[in-house]
Image: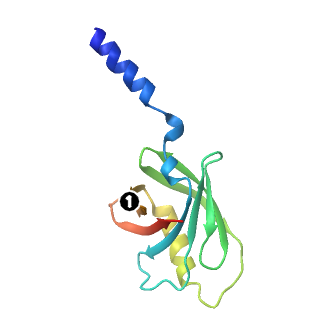
Amino acid sequence: MKYLLFVLTLALTTMNPDKEGSELMKEWKVIKIKGVEKLSSSPTIEFQKEDSKAGGFAGCNNYFSTYKLSGNTLSFGNTGSTRKMCPDMSVENAFLNLLPRIARYEIVKKELYLYDQTDEILITAISQ
C-alpha cells in the first residue's frame, strides 16, 4: 500500500497539465508541404497557449485559427485569413488546405512534423 501511494504521489507531482504542448509554443517556419515541389514562400505557424489560437504567414496572407491539443494529437479549427492576392498562391493554398487534415504532431530535434490520420507527413517546419 505504501508503494502504491508513493507511485501515485510521484505521478501527480510530476504531471503538469500546463506543460502539455509547451514545446509547440513558439514560431515555426514551414520547410516542406505535401504536394508542393518547391516553396516559393515560407509559411509560419505560431501557437499561443493562453487562448488556444494559432496563426502566422500563409505564403501571401496572414492567417488565424484555433487549435485543440491533447497529448500529441493536434487539430485546427476554422481558419481565416487576410484577402490579398499574390501572383503565386500555390504555397498558401496548399498550406491552408492541409491544416484541417492535421491529426497529430511530433517534434524531433528542432523539427515539427504534422501528420494526418493515416500518419502521412503533411507539413514539416523548423523552430525559429
At a point 41% along the width and 68% down the height, the residue shown is 122
Relative to residue 34, is residue 128 drawn left or right?
right
The image position of residue 82, as x and y in percent, is 71, 72
The image position of residue 26, as x and y in percent, is 56, 57
Nearest the eye: 75 or 41: 41
At a point 48% along the width and 69% down the height, the residue shown is 98
Q: Quadrant of residue 59?
A: bottom right
Q: Secondary structure at mark 1?
A: loop
Q: Is residue 101 above or below residue 16?
A: below
Q: Residue furthest top?
A: 1
Q: How is the image coloured?
A: rainbow
Relative to residue 118, is residue 18 drawn left or right?
right
At a point 64% along the width and 45% down the height, the residue shown is 50
Q: Is residue 12 above or below residue 92?
A: above
Instruction: Name the residue that disc number 1 marks.
Output: 109
Q: Quadrant of residue 42?
A: bottom right
Position of the N terminus, as image quadrant, is top left
Q: Residues within 10 Å of mark 1 (few under 14, many from 20)?
A: few
The image position of residue 62, as x and y in percent, is 67, 71
The image position of residue 97, as x and y in percent, is 52, 71
